[in-house]
Every structure is written in C-alpha cells, then in structure tokens.
Image: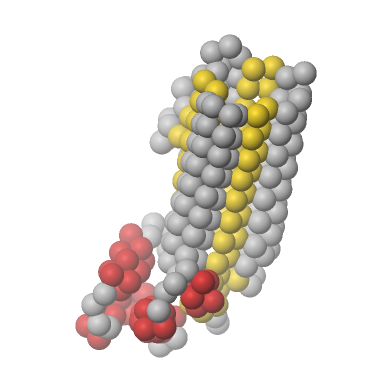
Amino acid sequence: MNSIHPKAQIGKNVTVGPFSFIDDDVVIGDGTHIGPNVTIYSGSRIGKDCKIFPGAVIGAIPQDLKFAGEYTTVEIGDRVTVRECVTVNRGTVYSNTTKVGNDTLLMAYVHVAHDCIIGEKCVLANTTNLAGHVEVGDSVIFGGMAAAHQFVKIGKHAFIAGGTLLRKDVPPYVIAAKSPTFYSGVNSVGLKRYGFSNDDIHHIQDVYRYLYNNGMNTTQAIEKIKQEVEDSKFKIEILGFVVGSERGIIRGIQ
C-alpha cells in the first residue's frame, strides 16, 4: 500500500497512510502522522508530532538550474502542520538546508523553495509562495496568495496581507499590504494576542513614526531614532533589521 525505504528512521507511534512514499535517508520523529499519498524524499528531517496531509511533497530537489546534485536537507521542526499539496524543497550549496520552525502551519498549496528559513509559530495561508533564500522570523502570518521574491527577509511578528507581493524586506512588528506593497502600520492586534503590553506597542509605534510618518528618508530617520527614541530591545532590533537590509525595506504609504 505504501513504500517505506528500510533505512528510513521512523520514530515511535508514527502513522503512515496508504500510497505514501518515504525515501532513504529520511528521519521522522515520534508521534508524527503521515497521511495518504505523501512523498518524502532523501534528506528530509521531520520532527515530533507533525501532521502531514495528502499530496504534500517534502525534500524534492530545488527548482534551481544551478543545483548540481549536491547533498542537502530539509529540516522541519516539531508540531508542524503541512496541509494538502504543500511543497518544501531541499536546500542548495548556498546554505545546504531549508528550515521550517516548530509549531508552524503551512496551509494547502504553500510552496517553500530552496534555502528558505521559516521561524517558529508562523502561519502561511493557502497558496503562499516563497522563492529561494527567503527568511521569515518567528510568529509571522501570511494571508492567502501572498508571495515573496528571492532573498527577501521578513521580521518577526509581521503580518503580510493576502495577495501581497513582497520585493523588499519587511521589518519586524509591522503590517505589509496593498499593491505595490507599503507599510500599513504596526501589527498591534497580533502583538496584543501574543501578550505585548500597550507600552511595548506604543514604543514600537514611536520607532516606526520616524521611519514612515515624518517625511524623512531612511538614513535621516535612523539618526533621529538613535537620538530621540528611548533605548529598548525593540529599538535595537528594528534598527538592526533596517540597517542590515540588503534589498531595502518596504516603503511607507505614498
């Protein structure tokens, strides 16, 4: 009914539905459920208590013409849910792996390309597509049919509205929406759900007022933030992200 390579390392209390294929050099943690018609290729590392639904393909070779057959992996954390027809490709020589963090939900038809890094407790809604080398921080939510250009970085606790096409980096704690994509405010509702205090949220909003609402360019805004905004871990984190952005950050509403 299914095909499981004898050298695959299958943990305790793992269930595998009919017509599923599990290749050599696969590790599956305890308590994970593999549904019917699932394909898991060599190099896949799947954690404990995951749920993988029909039609999912994990560990297929990268859709990258530069890929030359090098040994690479996919690493999926614990308690990850992979819904119907999701595809998660192996890494390339660039980073050697593709990673999906603990407690993340990949809804139906999501595509995670080679060398992507997805943090913990993320939600990628139906048909979200990540090109190669995309980095997603913890607790990021994508609305349906969102897409990210290769090498884009998304800071933690960001919210990406449905249908959004990301060509630039998205700083932490913000909402990215509209077309072309703009900063649409701080993700205050999401932050409250994660237990952020009103003072924390207001402080984050203060930082972004300089970046997006004061008519300054990014360089000018950074200097003002350094001089005028009270020091905090949020200020340090946001400035570090902005200064380190290689693609540049999303723009404010014009």
Q: Quadrant of residue 125?
A: bottom right
Q: Quadrant of residue 173?
A: bottom left
Q: Is residue 64 visible?
A: no
Q: Pinpoint residue 168: horizontal percent, then vertical percent.
A: 50, 62
In the image: residue 178, left or right of residue 218: right
Asked if 189 appears above or below 103 in the picture, the reply is below
Q: Quadrant of residue 230?
A: bottom left
Asked if 86 appears above or below 217 in the picture, the reply is above
In the image: residue 185, left or right of residue 206: right
User: Which residue in the rendered view is the most extreme toward the top?
Assistant: 6
Q: Pinpoint residue 31: horizontal percent, then vertical percent.
A: 57, 34
Q: Pinpoint residue 134: horizontal percent, then vertical percent.
A: 49, 49
Q: Pinpoint residue 177: horizontal percent, then vertical percent.
A: 60, 71
Asked if 42 appears above or below 199 in the picture, the reply is above
User: Which residue in the rendered view is the most extreme toward the front?
Assistant: 13
Looking at the rendered image, the quarter that the C terminus falls into is bottom right
Task: Write the residue at 72% across / 42% down.
Answer: 84
Looking at the rendered image, the quarter that the N terminus falls into is top right
Task: Write the residue at 47% across / 69% down.
Answer: 194
Q: Is residue 122 visible?
A: yes
Quick one: 246 or 188, which is closer to the camera? Answer: 188
